[in-house]
Image (cartoon, rainbow, N blue to C red):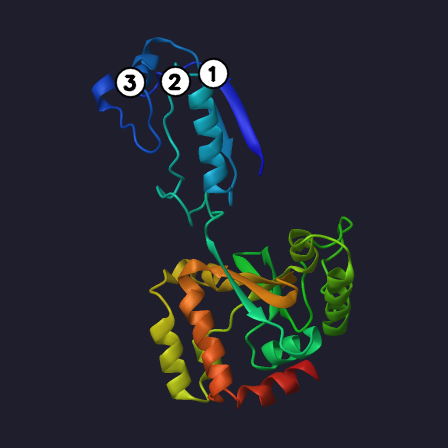
């Protein structure tokens, strides 16, 4: 969330006439921008990779409303897009929230979700490209600080169950319980269910056309537990594009079409 502010004089090194400049993105007071080449001071706001697009726009809107004489130019990221690019990789509206009732207890719900491969936690890091490290435990979104040189470790299945049950028992609001129990998850790929071609077909039909280079991003999400109207729910947050995909996974689980996957997940969890 770092924002860098740089105050400077306009750069005339491009040696272009005013009409040759391309002003794109989030533009306001364009005539004032054009006159900046006459020597008006300006400042530049830079935001880093994975910044939230809406936060950047909030900053610009605040400045524009507070200083009507201010001109703005920019907003597009280095991939010339608004979100899911190299700068604005995230959006506060990217995720869809889906809540499912906990019918018996937290442990039973998590056991079903993991044995059907619907919930699997991960951490990601950059090493010659983005790497995803999966675990049969859980990587918490709000994990404890990690000492320099140490690697973030997942908590076990049972530790996560204990954490959720403790959080649900605390006298805190629903938002706090979500924050305390949120874990990172990666939805399974359709190919994981190749044992039933019909299941693969239904999942692919529910999956939107995704750019291959960024495909993994869309499968990431979060899981949490919180009470709603006095009853505990399992709360998913996934890309809005993947809502129908997740609902299809639940339909396949309830129909018995992916029952075969339980043998593979059992072996994996007990290796």
Q: Which residue is mark 3?
A: 15
Q: Tell me the quarter of the image containing the N terminus.
A: top right
Residue 136 locus on image (x, y percent): 66, 74
Q: Is residue 167 above or below residue 78?
A: below
Figure quadrant of the C terminus: bottom right
Vertical placement of residue 116 versus 216, above or below: below
Residue at 69 percent across and 73 percent down: it is 106
User: Which label lies toward us, 2 or 1?
Assistant: 1
Nearest the eye: 85 or 131: 85
Label 2 sits on a secondary structure element that is loop
**What mark, if any, has residue 8 been given in the picture?**
1
Q: Which residue is mark 2?
A: 11
Q: Percent x, y for residue 164?
A: 72, 65
Categorize mark 1 by other alpha carbons within 10 Å: few (<14), some (14-19), many (20+).
Answer: few
Q: Which residue is at the front of the view, 90 or 62?
A: 62
Q: Quadrant of residue 169?
A: bottom right
Image spot of residue 107 (x, y percent) = 70, 76
Q: Contact, CB < 8 Å: mark 2 with mark 1?
A: yes
Q: What's the distance in space between the residues labelled 2 and 3, CA to CA?
A: 9 Å
Q: Is residue 239 above or below residue 82?
A: below
- Residue 255 appears in the figure: yes
Whether residue 197 sits left or right of residue 48 in the image: it is left
């Amino acid at each position: 969330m770092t924002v860098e502010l740089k105050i400077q004089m306009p750069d005339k090194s491009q040696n272009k006439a005013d009409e040759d400049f391309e002003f794109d993105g989030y533009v306001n007071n364009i005539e004032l921008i054009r006159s900046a080449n006459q020597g008006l001071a300006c400042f530049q706001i830079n935001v880093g990779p994975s910044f939230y697009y809406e936060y950047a726009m909030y900053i610009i809107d605040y400045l524009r409303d507070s200083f009507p004489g201010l001109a703005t130019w920019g907003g597009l990221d280095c991939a010339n897009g608004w979100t899911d690019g190299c700068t604005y990789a995230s959006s506060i509206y990217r995720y869809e929230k889906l809540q499912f009732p906990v019918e018996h207890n937290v442990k039973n719900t998590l056991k079903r979700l993991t044995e059907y491969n619907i919930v699997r936690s991960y951490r990601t890091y950059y090493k010659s490209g983005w790497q995803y490290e999966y675990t049969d435990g859980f990587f918490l979104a709000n994990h404890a600080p990690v000492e320099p040189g140490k690697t973030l470790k997942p908590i076990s299945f049972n530790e996560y169950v204990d954490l959720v049950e403790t959080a649900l028992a605390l006298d805190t609001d629903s938002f706090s319980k979500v924050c305390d129990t949120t874990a990172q998850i990666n939805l399974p790929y359709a190919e994981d269910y190749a044992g039933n071609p019909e299941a693969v077909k239904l999942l692919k039909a529910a999956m939107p056309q995704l750019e291959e280079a960024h495909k993994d991003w869309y499968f990431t999400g979060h899981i949490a537990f919180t009470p709603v109207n006095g009853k505990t729910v399992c709360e998913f947050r996934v890309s809005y594009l993947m809502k129908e995909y997740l609902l299809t996974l639940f339909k396949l689980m309830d129909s018995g079409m992916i029952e075969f996957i339980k043998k593979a997940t059992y072996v994996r969890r007990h290796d």
